[in-house]
Amino acid sequence: MHPILFELGPITIYSYGVLLAAAYLLGLWMASRRARQAGLDANKVLDLGIWVIIAALVGAKALLFIVDFDQFTSSWQEFTTLLRSGGVFYGGLIAAVVVCIYQLRKHKLPLWTSGDLFAPGIALGYMVGRLGCLMAGCCYGKPTDVAWAITFTDPVANMNVGTPLNIALHPTQIYESGAGLVILLLLLGLERRGRHYAGRTFWLFFLLYSVSRFVIEFYRGDDRGMPLDVLSTSQLISVVLFPLSLLMLWYLSRGSRPPATEASAPRRKPRFA
């Protein structure tokens, strides 16, 4: 759509970078706000969020490098495109979770409660970040003739991430951004319903995201690795993450149940009546 937001002499400001920064800042703002409401130290949560952002950036690019190893190692010019690419969201998510667990133990913050505080912020950041993909032209969809198809025409998008030009494509970036919005609303809405327990919102995010990502991947047209020639790398991760999320939701819900009342035993008669 508009890969370059504006230029200031030799400095080029890319739309993707601006929206990606906005995504991280909005997610961090929501997490710190929810932390204050929950009575946790907001400064510790902010420190944690900064480490999570760094891990997410590194992890996303690392998984992209692994998935497209042959392409990025074919020449120096191809390797430099890795710096302009956003990366694979799952790679960033997994790396962020690992670093988050370490930082939570370091700052002595409750694991699952903190995860619940961060989950809606991740969904919010994902929603905004995918709009950056739309502006950059990356993560594009397959050719289609649906009425809501989009067509990219900017040669910068083609040069940076190989976006097909002048071809009607599925707007997968909008699909994913919309999925992020739906997940965000569901997480916030369901927090006020049913029996709440620590870890519920966190694993519910993973459950919903794995389903949405698995489905939307069928409409993606960019090269993102097909280890089994049937499912993409992200779909394989979703296949593992979905049952794991169900298992964790079941396991954590059991720990929050009140102790079962003992079976009623026959009353003993008072020793001295």
Image (cartoon, helix red, strand yellow):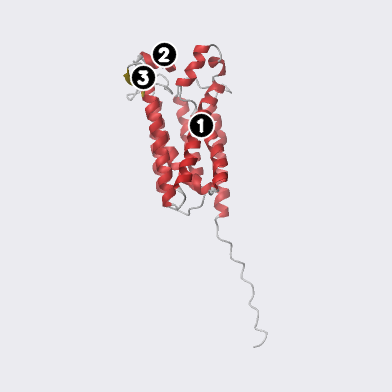
Specify the farthest residue to the bottom. 273
Q: Secondary structure at mark 1?
A: helix
Q: Considering only order in the chain, which callout, 3 or 1, is on the residue closer to the N terminus?
A: 3
Image quadrant occupied by the N terminus: top left
- Structural crowding at the residue carrying mark 1, measured as other residues with C-alpha within 10 Å and reported as few (<14), some (14–19) or many (≥20): many
Q: Name the N-terminal-most of marks 3 and 2.
A: 3
Which residue bears the numbered disc 3?
Answer: 12
Q: Quickly name the residue at label 1.
A: 92
Side of 178 where 41 appears, left or right: right
Marking on residue 125? none
- Could you tell me which secondary element the residue under label 3 belongs to? strand
Q: Is residue 30 visible to us here?
A: yes
Residue 2 seen from this side: no
Task: Tell me the residue at 36%/19% (across/down).
Answer: 12
- For this orientation, the residue located farthest to the right is 271
What residue is drawn where x is 45% and y is 20%?
A: 84
Instruction: Tell me residue 150's x, y (percent).
Output: 34, 21
Is 198 on the left-hand or right-hand side of 168? right
Q: Nearer the viewer, residue 20 or 130?
A: 20
